[in-house]
Amino acid sequence: MRILLLTHAFNSLTQRLYAELAADGHELSVEFDIADSVTGEAVALFAPDLVLAPFLKRPVPESVWRRVPTLIVHPGIVGDRGPSALDHAVQQGLREWGVTVLQAEAEMDAGPVWAHAEFALRPGATKAGTYRNEVTAAALAAVRAALTHYPDWRAGRWQPRVQDYADPAVRGRPHAPMNQAERALDWAAMTSAEILARIRAADGFPGVLDSLFGQPCRLFDAHPGPRVAGAEPGTVIGRRHDALQVATRDGSVWIGHVQRPGHAHPFKLPAALAFADEAATLPERADATPAYPDIAYRESADGRIGYLAFEFYNGAMGSAQCGRLVAAVRAARRRPAKVLVLTGGHDFWSNGIHLGRIEAAASPADESWRNIQAMDDLCLALLETTDRLTVAALRGNAGAGGCFLALACDQVWARDGVVLNPHYKNMGNLYGSEYWTYLLPRRVGEAGAARLMGERLPLTARLAAERGLVDRVFGGDVAAFEAELERQAAALAAGDVDARIAAKAARRAADEAARPLAAYRAQELEMMRRNFYGFDPSYHVARYHFVMKTPHSWTPRHLARHREPGWRPAAEAAA
């Protein structure tokens, strides 16, 4: 089918649908929902069989859905309506939720149902994490089911199911947008669990409006903390790296990120950075248990496998985080384990440099330079680990420098459903570093590297494996991936590991003799210096709009195929 994806932004769900449906053989193009007239123009140009809307913030124009069948992907069970569907489910602690694919009509979320899929809600999961994982997987299943009905619907042999609230199978109900009064925190009266539920239900967007140090802010990225005797609920009592510890009536919570409306930097930032002056006087809770999650190392029972986990919010890695991870890699190398597995975060493996920190710096160019050097140091620490095998275990998505950080390992194992974006150019034509000019061609060849970097499109884990970027794909969800990861790592450690380590060291020595890693790094950084300090401000402009969440004013041409000069449908082009 020819499908036009109409979306507010090319977010994680839209990327997964784009990559999977393209792999299914559908002809796709993307249009950002900017204005009714622009949407109408896109429909006229692409002439789709169907419009699919995975992520919208306003209704589809009637001129479109009356002309072309238009399916909405709603993150709620059948009958649920409203923009805060997932917020309510997470805050209420529901055990099950779902995704509904319904036909666009005049009333939002009220059209007939083409397909739906349900899933279990993970206890303690954030709204954003649920959206990226369970919602995305269910949405893909529901969309595929809906598309199977299209031929029969067009022939008049099948009709979607009307949402009738008298039907006991329609369990959802309309919800008004959740406001801040419904999210409000009462630090003196609420338990840590109640506070965590509210912040997690607002994670990603819009956050919970509250205050720290007497200053208004929106709270994100919350985790349980220990009890601190004598602390008044609601007061900030400590810090752990970039997180702030706030006392509750029965313990404490860690707040990892905040947003300060009206501040000089009004975008989301690490909490201790956003309140840098106030945080500087707080005690560092280095021994707090449970501590704010960040970097952790453990070993298998037999000591043959080391697991290095790092959980960075949204996969963004600042200079200090990279430095601490380099230290963790070096510490792991002092252990006798012959296999080192880097597991990354639950939602993201890594997305490379921390654009928010860079935007907030006194000199964004200087901080960009420090951050990319720190990422390079981390990649180098892995590339120079020639005394053991290294595995990048991608539980979550990876983008830009995060993809090449994974390629710095000997093996890349990815969860089925992970999406990779192994390119940089979408961020203001950024050239990129992380030794990609060495790492990518050695896996896919020079032509393959040029294709990947030029396409600027998301890859499913399976397609990445076909292209040579990923070595193994398994596990449909994180729990299944982690269970299989233990088995795969044990098999690797039990095999001819010494011979493989020797071969790896020999190959690295040969590559170094042919062209030193320092030469790759110098060439990449010379190009990056132009991005950061040169006359073309594209990177700085793109970064600013990214962190400020500026609405799109046009759709990038590599996504909007229908706007390419001379575009024709695939069937016509083949003829």
Image (cartoon, rainbow, N blue to C red):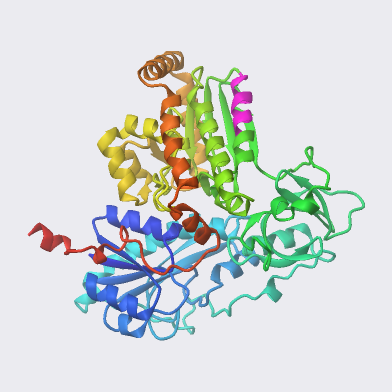
Q: Say if 149 sits above or below 253 in the image.
A: below
Which quadrant holds the C terminus? Answer: bottom left
The percent position of residue 170, horizontal first and vertical second, equals: 48, 77
Q: Main secondary structure of the magenta part?
A: helix
Residue 398 in sight in this render: no
**Residue situated furthest left in the rendering:** 575
Image x and y of residue 429, in percent: 40, 50
Based on the displayed image, in which of its 4 quarters is residue 105 positioned? bottom left
Name the outermost residue toward the right: 230
Q: Quadrant of the N terminus?
A: bottom left
Q: The magenta stretch spans which residues?
A: 325-335
Nearest the viewer among 339 and 155 is 339
- The image shows residue 383, relative to residue 318, as above or below, that is above
- Looking at the image, which is closer to me, 522 or 487? 522
Q: Please tell me how many numbered marks the rendered image carries.
A: 0
**Is residue 193 visible in the rendered structure shown here?**
yes
In this image, 419 relative to 25: left or right? right
Location of residue 296 in the rendering, given as x and y in whole percent from the top left corner: 64, 35
The answer to if 419 sits in the magenta stretch is: no
Q: Residue at x 44, y 55 (%)?
A: 538
Give residue 88's position: percent from left, percent from top.
60, 70
The residue drawn where x is 25% and y is 60% is 26
Q: With 446 as the anchor, is 427 left or right in this view?
A: right
Residue at x 40%, y 72% (from the top left corner) = 33
Q: Can you say whether 480 is above or below 220 in the image?
A: above
